Structures are given as C-alpha cells and as structure tokens.
Amino acid sequence: QVQLVESGGGLVQPGGSLRLSCVASGTTISLDFLAWYRQAPGKERELVANIGRFGGTTYGASVKGRFTISREGAKNAAYLQMNSLKPEDTAVYYCNVGRWWGQGTQVTVSS
C-alpha cells in the first residue's frame, strides 16, 4: 500500500515562497515518476511539475521559472519549492505517483 502525505501549505503574501513536501511510504520515491498537481475551486486539476526516474523535469507553463521540483531519497520525499507566488497559484496541491494520490495541501496566496 502506497501512501503519500503532503505538507507545507499555508497562507502567503504575493511574491512570497513556500516549500511543499511529499513523504512516501510503500514505494521508493527516487525510482518513481512523481508529479505535483493542483486544483483551484471550480477548475480542472492541472499538472504543476513532474520528475522522472532519471531526474528529468517538466513544468507547467504558468509556473516555469518560479517553481522547482526535487526529491530526496534518504527521506523518501519529494519537494516543490514555490517562489514568486501569485494569487492565481491558490489551490490544493497534490502529490501523485502512479495511481496513488496524497490528500492535498492548501496553498493560499493573498494579501
């Protein structure tokens, strides 16, 4: 059974930063294709970033240059560093590996 637990969300002012974490159990995260998605109220879930088994990364157009995905094998964790946050980044952020999803963490960008 794979479990993914996100944390690190919260309220931040525009221009601020947050780092989301996704801690995995039941899988070796360094060997997985892992993605971060987000879903804002009334909108479809969208891809934020992903990282492949050999470290290749892809970013959504709206976050490219501001967000960075990474992972740490020793902690079996993945991260999403979010800088220069904008109000339109407000959403619930989810960690995804294969068919498994975390419960999500709320990010709110507001002054």
Image (cartoon, helix red, strand yellow):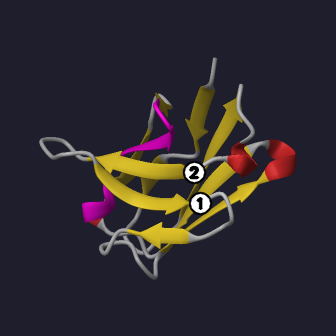
Residue drawn 25% across and 63% down?
Answer: 88
Residue 97 — which label? none
Element class at badge 1: loop
**Which corner quadrant holds the C terminus?**
bottom left
x and y percentages locating residue 54 in the rendered image: 69, 65
**Gap between marks 2 and 1 measured at Cα:** 5 Å
The residue located at (46%, 62%) in the rendering is 49
Q: Residue 103: horizontal and vertical position, in percent?
A: 46, 28
Task: Please tell me whether residue 97 is drawn above or below residue 2 in the rendered image.
Answer: below
Q: Amino acid at mark 2?
A: Phe
Write down the residue under mark 1. 52
Q: Residue furthest left?
A: 42
Q: Is 20 located above or below residue 106 in the figure? A: below
Q: Position of residue 68 (x, y in %)?
A: 56, 70
Q: Earlier in the sequence, mark 2 or mark 1?
A: 2
Report whether residue 53 is seen: yes
- Image label count: 2
Please give the residue where the numbered disc 2 appears in the rendered image.
33
Residue 89 shown in magenta: yes
Quarter of the rendering containing residue 14: bottom left
**Which quarter of the figure is the N terminus placed in?**
top right
The reply to whether the C-beta atoms of the residues labelled 2 and 1 are less than 8 Å apart is yes
In the drawing, does residue 111 fall left or right of residue 29?
Answer: left
Give x and y (percent) for residue 93. Answer: 41, 45
The magenta segment is: 88-99
Label 2 CA crowd tier, 10 Å (few <14, some 14–19, many 20+) = some
Numbered disc 2: secondary structure: loop
Could you say which is closer to the camera, residue 86 or residue 4?
A: 4
Instruction: Tell me the amino acid under the disc marked 1.
Output: Gly
In the displayed structure image, the side of residue 65 where residue 29 appears, left or right: right
- The answer to whether 21 is drawn above or below residue 62 in the figure is above
In the image, farthest residue toward the bottom: 65
